[in-house]
Each structure stands twice: as structure tokens, then as C-alpha cells.
Image: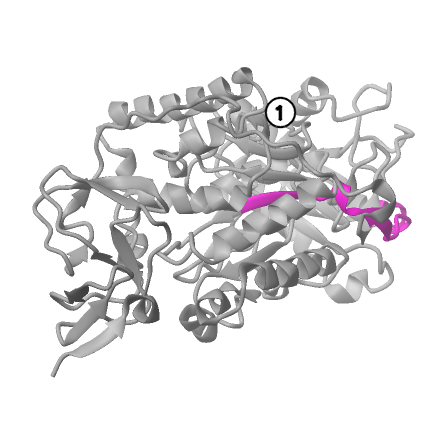
Amino acid sequence: MNQLIPLQDVAVRLHSQDNVAIAKVELHGEMVLSLDTGAQMPVGETIPPGHKIALQSLGMGDEVRRYGQLIGFATTSIARGTHVHIHNLGIGNLAHDYAFGADVRAVQFVPEGERRTFMGYPRVDGRVGTRNFIAVIATVNCSAHTVREIARHFTPERLAAYPNVDGVIALTHTSGCPLRDDTLERVLAGMVRHPNVGGALLVGLGCETNQAGMLVAEYGLCDCVVENCGHSDCGRNLAFPHCPTTLVIQDLGGIRKTVAAGIAAVEALLPQVNAVARAPQPLSELMLALQCGGSDAWSGVTANPAVGLVSDAVVRQGGTVVLAETPEIHGAEHLLTRRAVSPEVGQKLLAQVAWWEAYAARMGVSLDNNRSVGNAAGGLSTIYEKSLGAIAKGGSTPLMGVYGYAEPVTARGLTFMNTPGYDTIGVTGQMAGGCNLVLFTTGRGSVVGSIPAPTIKICSNAITYARMEEDMDVNAGRVLEGATLEEVADELLDLVIAVASGRPSKSEALGTGEAEFAPWSVRGVL
């Protein structure tokens, strides 16, 4: 005999206009679901958890809706009670109303005297670090090994006498020559002046296009007036991320001599960087990078909305959040333009989306290809569906600014940065823009981390969280078990403050982040 089960016990319908629901458990042909209307709907086939079941019969070309929004069009007839996924759902032409600013609502800021605080590192320019690193930065891939050797010399034992120094980190990449790349230059300059970097060394080979001296001069990385910045007589404040020391392998006579010079330079920096101690700072000095990776169908239901509530809370405290991954707002960009603080901001966002559409056309691919194998296995069927869930990380406050990749983020509040959908490249750009902490949601279980800004992982479902608890910081899947989004968001905000104050996130404790530093190579190589 078939089981008669209320729909809400086994599936989630997110909006009254939705014609699909998301299975919480495996649905199968022996089930009959009772709908809100009183009607009964037999389940026509096995449907995995996280996947969609049709709540009504659909004809070819009919709209399919989730979140009350269009996620695609039926590519064939779909019977009520059957599986809706990549085999019968596709993208098509959209006719969005971008209505710039139509949904802008004034932010109710927390009075300054009532704002929460964290223990951060104050910088001379007024920004605040959540960490206090010395960064050894390669200007070109040819110096990557040398940079790593310098940084790895400084073991915890060698740093024990400097309790305010959180580590010596190596930032390497695979570019720097022969073409000049302004994207790479912006990233490296952003790392030198990052609020989590108390001092920096730039290490080059010598014959590369991306010269360290050029980077220092053209990006204003030195505030002293002495030529050949980097020498010991510069008189610079080495506890502040300006005037990086520059080392050139060919000038110094090879790797071994450069490593020795680099170790000596870091040893000279250590006392001055250590002189900066943590002190109470307002939450307004947080700049959060918002990212997702390995998303599933629950990401847009649990983890991303919880991050959205935290984003709103940080904005109300006067802080900044940076949404990114332009290919992953495709099909949902209208929800952001309607919150744009001005038509100029809205148009700038649309221009970024248009660039990606043109880029995909030139490459002969569809932006729908952004949906990965893991996304599909987790129940996401189209880029529209993925995007609608992804933008929930940005909360509900006005969109105050839109930035190119790795550009310094100067607006406060909700902002957007143009990045690829590849997580590590996106986070690298956001950090270069000034983000001092990363909130990263995942459903399938991403294990990436980041330096110099620590990453907090928010898992969308309890199954993945239980399997990968050593890597996941917060179980947002509790929302599917009765917890409220507000409860999860409160827990996450407390963790944000704790990690910003020095508690290691789980990815940070595992030592991840060095390999994930990945500047976007837009131009490639010649």
C-alpha cells in the first residue's frame, strides 16, 4: 500500500509561485504526497535528496520556478510527481526588469556606541587586520621556489619570541612574464598593502617583465622619498604594509644567496611587526569576502541565506561585504540591480555580466557550463538556479559599489567584485581588494582555505558536515532539522568575531591557503 505523506515532511517548497519542490529525503514510487491544496500526488520515480520534484505537469518550453524566480525552461514534457533536472531542464532567453534602485531600502545602522568589537591589528591608514603576517611575495613564477624557502625558514619555534606575528607566508603564482599583466600587478600590490600584512618582501628574478621596482613605484607602495626603496636607510615604518623590501635573485647571485638575504630581511622586520598588538576594534572595520564552492541544492536554502543575514548585520555595523563570481549571478543579476544605490552602479554590474556573456560566446561555451559535476550531483540543474541561491550571500542591503578584479574596495556596505566563478581565483581578487576575512559556503564539501585572510566554512547540509566536520566550521544544515536561519546566523556572527580576533578557523588550523593563492590570468601567456 502506498504511503500518504505531507509534502512538507519530505520536501521544501520555497515560494508560493514555485512549481517544483526540493526533496529532503529520497522520494520513490511507493509514496503519495499530500499537497497544501488537499490534492494527492503520487511520486512517479526515484528522486535523490536535494533534487527537484515537479508539483504540476509541464509542457515543453514551460517556465520552471524556484525561489519564486525563473530557473529554466522544460526541454520536454514533465509529468507531475517526476524528477526535474538536467535531463529535462535548460536555460533560455530572459526578459528581466532591471529597475535600478527599485528595491533599495535605507540601512538601519547600529549607533556607533553600541557596535560590537573584535580584537584586531590597527594600521596607520585606519584599516584593521584580523591577522599580522609578514608576506614574502614572488613578482614572477621564476622566484616562487625562493620565496617558499624564505617563508619556510620561519617555523613556529623561530617565531615563538614574536607573539604578535601570526606567521611568515609565501605568496606565489604562475605568471609575471613575458607579457605585462595589470591584473597580476593589482593583486600583488593589494597583497603588499593588505590590512593583514604587517610587512612585505618582493622577490624577483631580475629579467622578468613584472619588475619589483616598477610595481612599487607605479602602485605607490612606498611612502618614503629615498630612491631604490627597500634598502635599510629608507626610514620607513616597517610595521605598516608600505615600502616593501625588494630582492632580485640575479643581482644577489642565485637562489641560496637570495634565501639568505630574505631570511635576514624578515628577521629585521620581525621586531617591528611584532610591535603592533591586537586591540579592540569596531565591527565596521571588517571587510568580508563572500564565496561559495561545491554548492548543492541546499546552499541557497540554508548556508547562503545564513551568510546573507550575517552580511546584513555587518553592514548595519558599518562594515563591508564583497560578493563576487560574476558568472554565478548570471540569471539573477536583476535582483542586484534593483538594489543598486544608483543607475551607474547598476549599469556597471550589467556591463560585467555582458563581458562574461561575450567572453563565453568567443570561447564557444555557455555560461550554463559553470554548473559543475558536483553541483549537478547535488541537485542544481541550471546556472540560473545556482545564481539565485548564490546571491543570497549578499543579504538585503543596497548595492553600494561595483569593482573590477582586485581593485581596492573603497565603498562601505554591500559591494560586488568581478571575478570568475573559480573559488580560489575569486578569493584572491577579493583579498587583493582588501577583504580581511572570508565566508565560504559549500554543500559538497570544499576544503580550500586562504591566506592572508582566514576562511570560515559554512556547510549547507548535515550529512556533508558530519562526514567532513574537521574541515567545516558551521553546520547550516540544522535549518532543515528545525533550527532557524537567525539562530545559525547568530552562531556564525559570533564565530566571525572570534576568528577575526585570532581564533584559527578549521581550514586555517589545517594549514591550507598557500596553494590556493591564485591571481586571475586573464591574458594568459605568449
Kindly tell me whether residue 238 is visible in this rendering.
Answer: yes
* Location of residue 146 by image quarter: top right
Report the span colored magenta.
268-290
Along the horizontal axis of the image, is 496 left or right of 157?
Answer: left
Kindly tell me whether residue 452 is visible in this rendering.
Answer: no
Q: What colouring does the structure picture have?
A: one colour
Along the horizontal axis of the image, is 508 left or right of 109?
Answer: left
Mark 1, Cα crowd under 10 Å, few <14 / some 14-19 / many 20+, is many
Q: Residue furthest front?
A: 38
Q: On screen, 114 above or below 506?
A: above
Specify the amino acid type for callout 1: Gln
Whether residue 283 is in magenta: the answer is yes
Q: Residue furthest bottom?
A: 1
Q: Which residue is mark 1?
A: 211
Q: Position of residue 9 (x, y in %)?
A: 33, 71
Name the foreground residue: 104 vs 324. Answer: 104
Q: Position of residue 489 (x, y in %)?
A: 60, 58
Whether residue 274 is in magenta: the answer is yes
Q: Quadrant of the N terminus?
A: bottom left
Along the horizontal axis of the image, is 8 left or right of 404?
Answer: left
Name the foreground residue: 79 vs 186. Answer: 79
Q: Residue furthest top?
A: 344
Q: On screen, 258 above or below 55?
A: above
The residue lying at 19 percent from left, 49 percent from top is 86
Q: Quadrant of the C terminus?
A: top left
Q: Position of residue 420 (x, y in %)?
A: 43, 36
Q: Position of residue 34 (x, y in %)?
A: 23, 68
Name the foreground residue: 354 vs 300. Answer: 300
Name the foreground residue: 108 vs 140. Answer: 108
Tag count in the figure? 1
